[in-house]
Image (cartoon, helix red, strand yellow):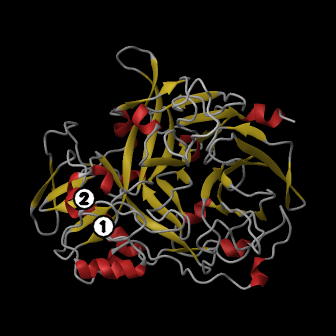
Amino acid sequence: MAAAAATLALTGLAAPAQAEDLPPDAPESWTQEPRATAGTPSPPATRAWTAPGGAASPGDFTLSPGELNAETTKRVARLDAVLPKSGVQNLLAGANRTVQPWCSRDSFGTAPDPDVKYCLQNDDSVSQEWVPQGFTGVSDAKDNELWGDAGNIQLFASYDGWDPGRENDPLPTAGDCTPAELEANDACNQKGVRITFVQSRTNPATGSPEVKYRHVLLGWTYVNSADHVSFDGLHAAEYPIQKGVHAGGIVWYGNYLYVADTRNGMRVFDMRYIMDLDPDGDPGTHDEMGTDTDGVKTTSNVEVKTKVGRHDNVWYSFGYRYVMPQVAAWKFKAAQSNPKGSYACVSTGAPKASYISLDRSTVPDRLIMGEYCRPESGYPSTGRIASYPVSALEGRSADVTAEGWANYLPMANGGAQGAAAHNGTLYVNESKGTDEPGNLWRFQWSNGQLVQNGQAVKTARGAEDLYVERGTGRLWSVSEHRPGAASDCTANRDPADPAGTDYCQRVLYAHKLSWLDSRP
């Protein structure tokens, strides 16, 4: 195990947390998709850009199918034979957490109130561990915005951003936690990324409207030395978040969920493979699972929150009932030469996949990908953004190049956290620090160039990814900040709320597109 950990450390990947029987020299093919090459910054000539809002090279955004997609398909098929599955509707029918509409939490301050505001349960709202990022929903998934009879559905992604046991080190015994604490302390384990399914519905018992939600852990599969298929959380290191895939943007399209992987491209998940480790709904009973190729029966345990994957014929999932494994990946074809140690971006070569969204107002439907960048000396780019025909991503048999448009963002200070296009307008969320409302920008295309349309609209502190809900005419997002940490929201608070309880807890929120478009 020590040799395996050392091998993984050299590749920059985290060893699978609590993995069973890893080989002493685990090849990279048993871990996650290898990362695009990260070298020294490109020569100065590649840092030039056409102009703010000018055309960028679509070819730089070219994605190639992951080298391990065929192997991943085999692993997921094996996992599918062992673990029972749950569809989206069944998952939502058992949603175990409740949203509070229009609670007192106010992450908007002097910014205009949104059209809708949902407050998460207290532990999710102030969690040091889980940080919300990407946003999508059933309006992306289906042209008719219906997923069976499940009603309106939104999804948001969160990454595990606080891990005293790993703390920027790929070895599972590094950091502030001892090996014993890794076994005993839930927070010591790096869990990667989870997706939260949110449903607006009518309570079947009371007939009253309610909003419920449920978390699902994302995972990647591997085969261990005992030839058992297993899974772990997502742990591909990237800068500056060294603790896993950042999930800054997500898109649900048909059966597939695309998750932005900043320095690599995208991870792909499948709604048909949501594994249910507690099918009877009672965590206290350890349910019988299927058998792997060895024919040995397995059970599950969702009470233990410090283990993941298969151990001694028992399945664990960091305490989550549902796990959705990665089924494929898309990787940037060009070399990744964005500098590490800063938010600066080069202007050509592979971009950063900081956020993604979907534009269903065009023909064909387009997946949008953009960069979070802060300009520095020698690196003037405030980020590139481009679009792909999303149907081309479903085949995974050939490279897919951005087409339709590719531009540099016309933002003086950068900081784009999310972008969405609808009916010819590009909406961009810009973060403005921990204690200042964000900016929601509007741009339009003129002769192939992005130009500003009106002034920035003030929005939530910590504004993140954007999602267009076509039927309601709303533009959704989520705020990421929480009270209680100097970097997250402590200065300039309302004197009446010194603890920040209402000042900057996390909310899901939406503005009316018609209201935004009418702003000067």
In the picture provided, is 514 more to the left or to the right than 51? left
Total numbered labels placed on residues in the image: 2
Contact between labelled residues 1 and 2, with CB atoms less than 8 Å apart: yes
Residue 405 appears in the rendering: no
Q: Which mark is residue 172?
A: 1
Q: Which mark is residue 130?
A: none
Q: Could you say whether the residue bearing mark 2 is in a helix, strand or loop?
A: helix
Few, some or many residues within 10 Å of mark 2 (<14, 14–19, 20+): many
Earlier sequence position, callout 2 versus callout 1: 1
Q: Please state, as top left, top right, bottom left or bottom right, where the N terminus lies in the image.
A: bottom left
Q: Is residue 36 above or below residue 317?
A: below
Which residue is located at x 84 percent, y 65 percent?
A: 54
Residue annotated with mark 2: 182
Q: Is residue 34 above or below residue 272?
A: below
- The percent coordinates of residue 134 (x first, y second) are 55, 50
- The percent coordinates of residue 131 (x first, y second) are 48, 48
Q: CA distance from mark 2 to mark 1?
A: 8 Å
Q: Could you say whether the residue bearing mark 1 is in a helix, strand or loop?
A: loop
Q: Is residue 99 above or below residue 76?
A: above
Q: Amino acid at mark 2?
A: Leu
- The percent coordinates of residue 192 (x first, y second) are 40, 57
Few, some or many residues within 10 Å of mark 1 (<14, 14–19, 20+): many
Of residues 443 and 183, which is closer to you in this image? 183
Q: Amino acid at mark 1?
A: Pro
- The percent coordinates of residue 347 (x first, y second) are 74, 73
Quarter of the image for residue 379 reads bottom right
